[in-house]
Each structure stands twice: as C-alpha cells, then as structure tokens.
Image: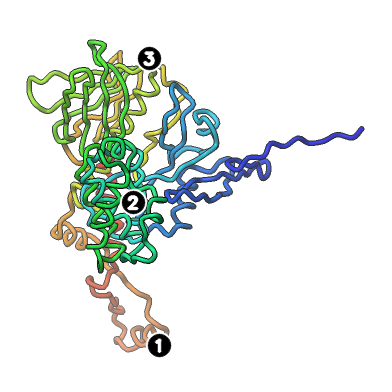
Amino acid sequence: MPFKFHLKKSRQYNVVSKNQYVICIELLDTTSIECTLSIDSLGQECLDNVTQRLGLGQPEFFGLRYISRHDSPSPRWVDMDKPLKKQLEKEAKNFSLYLRVMYYVTDVQLIQDEMTRYHYYLQLKSDILEGRIQCNSRQATLLASYSMQAEFGNYDAERHTMECLQQCTLFPKDVIQADPGGQDSLLHTAVCQYKNLMGVTQAAAEELYISIVMQLEGYGNETFSTKDNGNNEVILGISINGIMIVYPNTQTTQFYRWKDISNVINHKKTFRIECQAEGEEPKQFIFTESRNAKYVWRLCIAQHTFYMQHQESRPIERSTNGYFDSDTNDSGDHAVSVNLDNRNTEGHTRWTSYNDLSTSPYPVVSSTDINNLRALLPSYRPAPDYETAVQMKYNNGGNPPQPYYANQSTIVGADISCLLGNVVNRSRY
C-alpha cells in the first residue's frame, strides 16, 4: 500500500540524519548562517563554528541566545558546556539562535581585533536603536554621525542626500517622539556633524561610537524583574561592573560593585546579595520561578569571572562553567555551595552561594615567579648525532662520557606556560 512521508521544513532547524541537524544563527548584521551539528554537539562547538567563519579574533566576548518558552518570552544565554539540541528542546520557544555580545567591556582598547570591533559596534548600535541603552537627542545625533561615518565613509553630497539617509534607521523611536522637530530635525543635525568627520577612518568612527555608548545608562546591563521582601517591584541589572537595583515605584537606584559584594546566594526562588560593609543588611529578592533565580545567580558568577580576568590584566578566556544550564532540579530543596578554594556541602538547609566575590580567583604571576618556575624546570638533554656519540665514547680514555646539556635559557616558553597553567588552575573554582 503506498504511503508518504510528511516532513516539516524549517529554516531554523532541519534534520539531516538521525545523528545530525542544521540550525540557523542570526548574526548582528541581520544576516544568517547555518551550522551542521550532531545531536551531542555542545553549545561551544556551535559558537566556535560561527566565530571562526566570521573571523572574530576575540570570540570570548560573544555568546548565543535563544528565546525562552517559560513565563513571558525572554532571551537566555546558551550553556556552552551542554548539548545544544537538548537545551533548545527543553527551554527554547523555537529553534532560532542569535549571535550577540555577552560580555561588555569598560575600555574600548580591550577590543583589539578589527572584525570583533565591527560586530561589537553593531551590537551597541542595536542596543541604542532598540532602547536597551538610553540616550538623549544630542547624544543620538552624535552617535548617528559616527554611525554614518563608520558605515558610509566620508560624506559625499551626491550619494548621501537627505532622501537617501531618511531610509536608514539612525535614531531610537523614543528620541524621535521626544524631539519637537522629529526625525527631520535630528537627521539635519546629524548630517552637519557627519560632514565635519571628513578624514576620520571608518575604524576610528566605530571606536568613537563605542566610547560614547560606554558612558550611557544601561550599557552592558541585563535586567530582570523581581520583588523584594516587602513585595515591592524591583529591577535587577547585572553587568560587568556589578549589580544595579532599581525601585520603579520610588525611582531610587542602588549600585553594588563586585568589590562591594562578598557573596551572592541562590535558594529555590530566592536570590540574595551579601555586602562587604559591616552592618549592612543583605539584599534579598524573590522570583516567580526558581529557574529565574538560578539563572540570575549564574549570570552574576559569569560576569564577575569576566570582570576579575580584566581586573588582573590577564588574557581573556572563555569561562562558562555550566552557569546557564537547564537543570531539571531547579525546584530542589538544596543545592551545593561553591567556594573558591574547594567545593563542599554546608549545613542541613543548604544554599547555592558564591563566596568571597571581593578577591580574585586568578593570582598575578610576576617576572620573579616566572624566573623561579624556570629554575624548577629539568635540564634538557638533546640526543647527539651518531659521530658525536662515537667520539664521546672512544676519545675520553675510557672515562665515562660527559653528558651534553643545553643551556637552561634555551628551554622554550611553552614549558613555562605549562607550569604557570598548573599554578593558576589550582586556584580556579
């Protein structure tokens, strides 16, 4: 009896075989690329595939996002250390991924790769136009002029007419609505500033754009709605610098830098911030779902880790440590306490904590330490060629042959790096 296969086709998620699938990732320039993965492929494999194809020299700034199916749809970061397919099937609203900047920096000089800087610029431009970062009309016109210089090059009266530029999205909607003259007035001011940027390279214009946005409200913040112990609405903002607490009803804001925080704790639906200052009460917040409280806690750890790596001027490393997993036991009665020195279990009613945020888990290795480590390395004895070996054997008058050692300074730096890696890894959590 004849039969037919009814296969569901999708641009985002196509089954290639029993063990492979193709997933579509939207890039920051709104184009998309496809990756073929196995069902066991980790999130990091997908990210590596994308960043390598784009030629991003500093992929540690980036992550992959999906839209969560739980509560109100909200973006969540993919756990790099877990199979991607299982995460999306359990947590995602659909099988669409988005390449985005996950870790924002406080100094544009930290962005040294040209392709990375371009994508970083695209992320900030999107943040501005979509209102995630706030700016006024003066700042918006200045940013628009830098944006035009970065994307179009030097002003050309024949090509860059007002009619042409009006087709481009250059200003946030709320800024256009707040300005008395509307978009035409803003665009006229921006074009005048654009003309004065003649000779500024497109790369320099990108850096100027990034430098301005770094100073604006909301830069690098990922916000979450919650309530305090008094059932008051609270917005938590997690960033590379620390945690911001906003009370919309009273229009008050508190900001705690990572050096001011001694610990962040998660237990079921509760998220708590403990401060360094003596006598200051911990700040405790209640989320509607335990998975949200755990996600915020893990995001704090990830941002703090990235902050400490820059604080100590160490090379940037990708650090996921399973912070954004889809734990099936989110509503469990206990969790494991995470310490910098070791991992242990505390008490009968245990909380998930991240102790001593004020100190760095990464020791600074000085030149003296390097020399000391160099002295610990064993001497390297290369094998002599055949003629030298014969001479050493028969020309020493029957005396035992003298060993031939290379100079200690000729030992390659890779061995030093290996020892340094062992020292650093002992203190990692």
Depth check: give the residue in front, 164 or 173.
164
- Please tell me how crowded label 1 is: few (under 14), some (14-19), or many (20+) other residues with Cα within 10 Å: few
Image location of residue 114, percent across then percent down: 33, 61
Q: Which label belongs to residue 344?
A: none
- Please tell me how crowded label 3 is: few (under 14), some (14-19), or many (20+) other residues with Cα within 10 Å: few
Q: CA distance from mark 2 to mark 1?
A: 60 Å
**Residue at (32, 49) in percent of width and height:** 317
Residue at numbered disc 1: 387
Which residue is the extreme one toward the right? Answer: 1
Residue at numbered disc 2: 120
Residue at numbered disc 3: 333
Image location of residue 332, percent across then percent down: 40, 17
Residue 421: tell me if it is visible: no
Q: Earlier in the sequence, mark 2 or mark 1?
A: 2
**Residue at (39, 86) in percent of width and height:** 390
Please identify, in this view, whether the residue under mark 3 or under mark 1 is nearer the observer: 3
Q: Is residue 251 above or below residue 412?
A: above
**Residue at (31, 47) in percent of width and height:** 184
Query: Which amino acid lies under the numbered mark 3 shown in the image of this protein?
Result: Asp
Query: Which amino acid lies under the numbered mark 2 shown in the image of this protein?
Result: Tyr
